[in-house]
Image: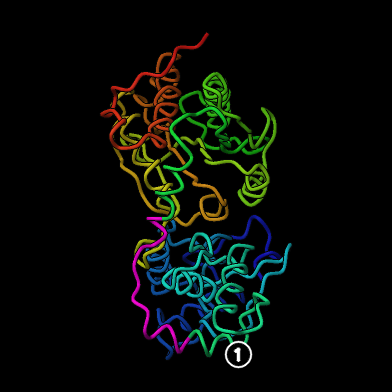
């Protein structure tokens, strides 16, 4: 299983061995590779299949099977009804079967939380409520009896997007004031992981400084803030998600910088949890990603690489709306020079703070992009 794989796990074009044979087997099971060939070579056919799978799952389509892609390959093999599903704290079941169960419960008006394929407390409570409605024992476990009833009813239920209405209502109910809101700020990388190193800058050091400024700005506006790491700290995305989930925050903002072998690559981009090919996404995350993207482009003059849905661990595993912001390319001399200036960093912080405020404003009170001004720091 994934948890036994080393953090450095990485298989790509040209590799051979039992790990590659396993990858080929999973791709074949998913119908992405021909069943007529048996090999332990990561050839071009496997590379193409992996890239297609990554694109479909909202992953970075680079043809490399690292831990993230391996997890998704493992999860994709499960179909609803293949196994008994239940909530076990500390050892949560994850898979496409869980996501299908969550979607069916949503379509029937229950509240399993985000459709993320993770069998958490909200999913167990929603299934228990379904079982009570059906006269079944409400143990929150999907066994044969509950599955049979669910299958029978699912043929009569028309789907939709009830999660959009639910998340929109939750935002409106929370009110426009930032006082009392809680935000987790995640400065990417840290510790021994410096992230992108280019043009005299370290990604981890730059985003740490921006994170500290953002923490100060939001705190001055009455927001309770949490940092996922310290100046010399680190931790992987799973650990950061667990920390964030322990804060009961409303929003998570993950700060990063990009790098590319082509120095002409430039611009800012934002990412939210979503697998839109299968109709799964965080509505609040998508809304905030769009707001912060537009504010950064308008106020900082950075190129617009738009907002995108991704299923990366930090975006998927956090219970609150989470957005990852790529504030430019350190490998681009122009972006690097801008990112290195105190003026742009201050503009970036203000852009993010304004986007946080706009997320909670009702449409009639909102302002156009680049126009809203927050109270000045004391």
Nearer the observer, 17 or 209: 209
Percent from the top left, x then y, of residue 271?
A: 41, 46
Percent from the top left, x then y, of residue 366?
A: 31, 31
Decide whether residue 163 is among the magenta residues. Answer: yes
Q: Residue furthest left?
A: 368
Percent from the top left, x then y, of residue 192?
A: 67, 37
Q: Residue at x 73, y 64 (%)?
A: 89
Count the marks.
Answer: 1
Nearer the observer, 231 or 259: 231
Q: For the magenta stretch, what is the residue range?
A: 151-165
Q: Residue at x 36, y 65 (%)?
A: 279
Q: Image height check: is 266 above or below 311?
A: above
Q: Residue at x 61, y 67 (%)?
A: 125
Nearer the observer, 288 or 195: 288
| Element marked by disc 1 | helix
Q: Quadrant of residue 124?
A: bottom right
Q: Image height check: is 294 above or below 136?
A: above
Percent from the top left, x then y, of residue 166?
A: 43, 55
Image quadrant holding the N terminus, namely bottom right
Q: Quadrant of residue 195?
A: top right
Decide whether residue 59 is among the magenta residues. Answer: no
Q: Residue furthest top?
A: 378
Which color mode does the image show? rainbow
Q: Residue at x 55, y 18 (%)?
A: 220
Nearer the observer, 9 or 178: 178
The residue labelled by disc 1 is 144
Q: Image height check: is 47 above or below 241?
A: below
Q: How dense is the environment of label 1, judged by Cα within 10 Å: few (below 14), some, or many (20 and up)?
A: few
């Amino acid at each position: 299983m994934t948890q036994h794989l080393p953090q450095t796990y990485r298989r790509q074009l040209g590799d051979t061995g039992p790990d590659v044979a396993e990858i080929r087997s999973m791709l074949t099971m998913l119908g992405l590779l021909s069943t007529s060939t048996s090999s332990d070579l990561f050839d071009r056919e496997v590379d193409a299949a992996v890239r297609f799978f990554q694109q479909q799952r909202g992953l970075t389509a680079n043809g490399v099977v690292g831990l993230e892609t391996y997890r998704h390959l493992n999860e994709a093999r499960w179909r609803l009804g293949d196994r008994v599903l239940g909530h076990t704290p500390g050892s949560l079941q994850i898979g496409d079967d869980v996501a299908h169960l969550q979607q069916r419960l949503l379509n029937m008006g229950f509240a399993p939380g985000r459709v993320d394929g993770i069998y958490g407390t909200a999913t167990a409570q929603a299934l228990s409520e379904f079982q009570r409605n059906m006269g079944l024992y409400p143990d929150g476990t999907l066994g044969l009896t509950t599955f049979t009833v669910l299958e029978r009813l699912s043929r009569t239920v028309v789907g939709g997007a009830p999660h959009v209405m639910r998340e929109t209502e939750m935002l409106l109910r929370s009110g426009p004031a930032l006082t009392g809101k809680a935000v987790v700020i995640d400065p990417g990388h840290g510790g021994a992981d410096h992230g992108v190193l280019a043009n005299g800058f370290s990604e981890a050091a730059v985003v740490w400084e921006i994170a500290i400024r953002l923490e100060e700005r939001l705190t001055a506006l009455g927001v309770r803030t949490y940092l996922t790491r310290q100046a010399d700290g680190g931790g992987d995305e799973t650990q950061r998600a667990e920390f964030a989930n322990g804060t009961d925050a409303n929003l998570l903002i993950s700060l990063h910088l990009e790098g590319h072998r082509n120095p002409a690559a430039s611009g800012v981009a934002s990412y939210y949890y979503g697998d839109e090919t299968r109709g799964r996404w965080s509505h609040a995350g998508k809304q905030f990603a769009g707001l912060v993207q537009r504010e950064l482009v308008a106020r900082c003059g950075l190129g617009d690489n738009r907002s995108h849905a991704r299923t990366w661990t930090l975006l998927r595993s956090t219970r609150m709306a989470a957005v990852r912001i790529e504030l430019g390319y350190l490998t681009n001399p122009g972006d690097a020079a801008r990112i290195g200036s105190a003026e742009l960093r201050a503009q970036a912080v203000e852009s993010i703070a304004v986007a946080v405020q706009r997320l909670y404003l009702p449409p009639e009170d909102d302002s156009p992009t680049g126009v809203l001004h927050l109270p000045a720091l004391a």
